[in-house]
Image (tube, helix red, strand yellow):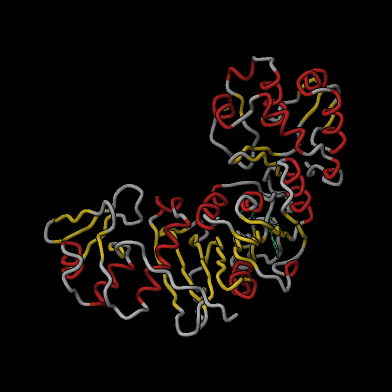
Amino acid sequence: MPLPGVSNLEKSPGPALASRWRACGIDRAFLRRMTEHPDNLRRPLTPAREAQFRDDAAAVLLRLFFCAIPTPAWEAEAAMGAELLGAVRECGLLLSDGDRLTAPFHLRLIRGLYLFSDYLNGHSEAVMGAGETTAILYQAGCPTHAVQRALDLGCGAGTLALLLSRTAAHVVGTDINPRAVALAKLNASLNGIANIEFRRGDGFAPARGERFDVILSQPPYYPNPQGESIETYLHGGVRGDELAWRIATEAPSYLTPAGKAVIFASWTSGRPPIHTPDLKVLELSANRRELHGTRQGITVLAHTPAGEAWHAEREVSADRWGEITRAAIEEIFAVEDYLLQPNGGMAFEVSEGLTVLKEGTQTVVQGAPGSWVGTLPVDEATRAILESPNAGHPPHAVHAALRRGLLKLSGKPRVNAPSQSR
Ligand SMILES: C[S@@+](CC[C@H](N)C(=O)[O-])C[C@H]1O[C@@H](n2cnc3c(N)ncnc32)[C@H](O)[C@@H]1O
């Protein structure tokens, strides 16, 4: 099946379609109640039994747009009005099949945003919508405070760009795939968002010479040993992480002095560390390999004044991988900044919910639900720290406990002021 055309999407009726869905009550709770089976980027939603038999406008529009069930044109017209239906057909969001209409695009409601994308069924140019990995990157990278400029590199259907537009005054979304740019523009218009510019191009080329307070990117990272790009959204090179590596190494030149780049990729084990004298680099990795032998990672990059560079790594247990938040990342940044300072005057506390247990001759610590620490064996020095954090322990042991997330700086951790020298 060829992908549906996108050349007329700019004639879409904009927010009027989303307004119609909203007015009918098609919100998150409705979709949850009226559909079955877990979410999936490959298939439409499956209507629950109740949604199959109701004939009110919400149920009709749910079956038509979200479940891609062919629907008589007269029924669609009754649910959305002739004018809106005409505009939706003209731009290609609904296609005629005899006297029935079908919806060719994948559609979901994510954090209050209606998002069209393609079904991911092996077509080389298919555009990815909001997936599980998109959600992880959003949580880890979306700023919690207002910023000026944000970039979503490899924006796909524009999910992250649209979410960033809530905290950034201006957002740029870029993608090498022209379909992605068309769908991302459609989604911005559908949701009535005007502070995003979508541009087409390879890597950072469409943002040459610009600086951003936030850069988010989830480039394709699956290996393609044949060396040809099979699916643009999926394959990142022969090894898989070549494009991700290019983006990670170029990102610092596009950051403002206080900016952060957060890159989600799956790295091969032989990849060299990103280590430069003017960067703070945090590499989080999931402690489980993907099927093709790589590990998912979140790489956070920021500038630093000369002499204050660091490179930190944290392994996160696979079942906690989806819980990494921007606040947790900020805390690691504060700890790593602290570790560079002379150790005077700071107090420590044991991380919340951590318990120390005896298991035979071993001592182990166990994290509370939601913490990154699973169950870890600890040595005598760490046990002593956890029992009385401020009793004057050797600095290397304190540092090790801080780095493993067992200990926290008490009170609000100090964060170094960003360098203004760039
Ligand atoms: C895994 S998808 C991520 C989509 C979206 N950002 C998300 O997180 O849901 C990767 C995206 O990168 C785009 N891409 C692939 N190669 C690229 C390149 N060289 N430059 C820019 N974008 C690229 C693909 O077209 C695709 O939309």
Tell me which image quadrant ligand 1 sits in: bottom right
The answer to whether residue 204 is above or below residue 296 is below
Residue 409 as seen in the image, left or right of residue 380: right
Q: Residue furthest left?
A: 361
The answer to which image quadrant residue 225 occupies is bottom right
- Direction from residue 260 to residue 381 in the image, left or right: left
* Residue at 58% in and 22% down: 48
Q: Position of residue 109 (x, y in %)?
A: 62, 37
Image spot of residue 132 (x, y percent): 54, 47
Near-viewer residue (39 or 138): 138
Please identify the quadrant where the C terminus is shown. Answer: bottom right
Give me the residue at 54% from left, 49% from top.
135
51 on left or right of 371:
right
Q: How many marks?
A: 0
Give how far across and how far down residue 421 sits, in percent.
57, 81
Looking at the picture, does residue 249 appear above or below residue 223? below
Where residue 374 appears, x then y in whole percent? 31, 54
Position of the N terminus, as image quadrant, is: top right
